Image (cartoon, helix red, strand yellow):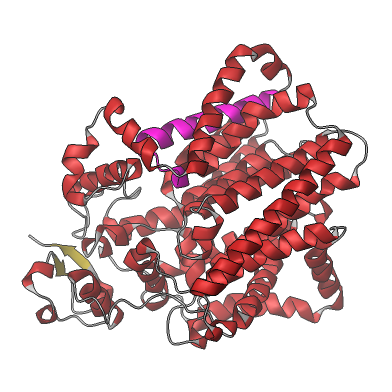
Amino acid sequence: MIFELISWLYISLICLIWGNQLLKLFFGVKEFAGIDFYTVCFTGMSFIGIISFYISLVIPLNTAIKLALQVPALLVLLKPANRKQLLSQLGKPFAGLSVSDFVFLGASLLMVLFLCTSLVIHPDTLNYHSFSTQIFDKYGSIPGIANLKLQFGFQSLWFAVMAFFDFSIFRSGPWFPLNGCVMGWFIVFLVSNGSKSKKIISGTISIQNGIWYLILLLFSILSWTQIRLTASSLSPDFIAAISILLGFYFYIGKQEHDMREISDLLAVFFSVIAVAVKLSAIPVLLIPLLIFGNAIFKRRFLFAGLVCFAAVILLAPIIIRNIISTGYPFYPSSFSAIDLFDWRIEQSRVLRLQHFITSYARYPILMENVLKEYDQPFTTWIPVWWRHLYLIDKVVMLLIVLGALLNLLFFKIWVRNYTKKMITAFVIAVAGSAVWFIKAPDPRFGTGFLLPLIYFQYAPFVAYIGLMDNKFGYRFNAGIKSISTAFILLYVGYRAVYFFHPRQLIFPEGIKNTSFIQSDCDERVKRMVMNDAVSPGQLPDSCLFFRFRGTTIKAGFKPAP
């Protein structure tokens, strides 16, 4: 736990410094009073991830590369004025928090800490997340690596930045503390913004905003696939959702003349970052598209060009690495397959993988059952899908259906309380939710669109009816926090009794090592790659579903004839 906390502080410092520099140089931010600490850190982290992605196309992310990006950030601390600014930014989220807020925040962070230091046994992390992340460190990129296993072709900005903050040097196995650190930022952001409601006595809008932040935090804790899963795995799902939420946040955020372009640029940045983290977030690119269209309509051609340039620069390394790894620029989509490379995966395998993702998102199935399950009609799979949902996810679905009915019944009230930009954001949320439901209806894949959709459905009615006056709203907020704190501490106690070992006080358990207990093709192939051993003789015939392209692992793989 001690080293986990130290790593969180170190990562936060590096990301905060780079975030400050990026916002100053490329976004024109001169005063950071209006930019949240969490936003600056997430911006810095994303910037590091993009740079790491570009570098990985050519060379591995070795220690020298990492130091080349970390040391300049640390040199900023040599200047007293910079240290003062950073300390101010680090302390700002905690200024003015009440005792109950600190207890609630402390309990939530303690929960994340217990999750991060426990043994990581998440199936997808053991299956490919950890392996794919380590490839950045050892090789950078490998042509046709998806021929070994289709999931090895999934490329994510999250894997790149996780590799950059790989602290395995301090222990014998893989250790990636970034996931817990980002969850800590997220919790601090929501608790800090939620507490601001108590500082403004007049007007119910602030109280209601505080409750919206609280609802988002409680959902993220209650739903296993959000904060808790991210803290205990290398899954990029919730990171993509957070990026989408930030895209919406800035798209409908501060629109004063001096902040409008900055907000729009940040909306573009985080929307594209969401797609770089996970391709399934692609409907969020409607935000940059609308911002670009609006700039063209208003003859702001320089700004429109900047939007296009940013999108291309941020997406280019992801597309290039997809081509290197699979032969498909938008993998796992088979769209725009490139036949120039001998490592391109057979299209039939890619299509089968797409169908498997869709079918598995409805309810767990085996790969061999894809053909039978994928073509099931709505009336057949929806009842089974519903039974497999967690209770909290069923609540989300029911709220969306009820919200749709309210919007239809009270359409005039809903429209009257929204600006054109809010309505377009609502349409984007609907489009993203529709694509999610058709392509991969597992709630963890659609959180970034489903939660904004609920907000856009209900916020106008809450504001119109004025459900929360100041006194009642503040008491309601405080009461929910107190009850939540009690349950979170009970959960922490449960984790402490059943999953905690004294050795975790110093170091986290790390990721479970399966290579010594599994001898299947998957583990043998992983060991072959990690040991840089090109020796087909070590693998049984049932494993040889690929061919080597050269005499080294770096040369890559191609499909077996």
Q: Position of residue 404 (x, y in %)?
A: 55, 22
Q: Nearer the viewer, residue 339 or 32?
A: 32
Q: Quadrant of residue 153?
A: bottom left
Quick one: 531 or 212, which is closer to the camera?
A: 212
The residue shown at (53%, 36%) is: 395
Which of the 4 image quadrants contains residue 491? bottom right
> Residue drawn at (59%, 42%), measured in percent from left and top?
307
Residue 105 drawn at (x, y percent): 72, 61
- Eyeballing the image, is 399 above or below 365? above
Q: Is residue 331 left or right of residue 1?
A: left
- Horizontal side of 420 relative to 274 (left or right) equals right
Residue 368 spot, x, y in % from top left = 16, 49
Q: Quadrant of the N terminus?
A: bottom right
- On the question of residue 161 being in view, the answer is yes
Given residues 41 and 143, the one toward you in this image is: 41
Name the outermost residue toward the right. 201
Residue 536 within the magenta-colored segment of the rendering = no
Q: Is residue 95 left or right of residue 114?
A: right
Q: What segment is highlighted magenta in the picture?
A: 419-445
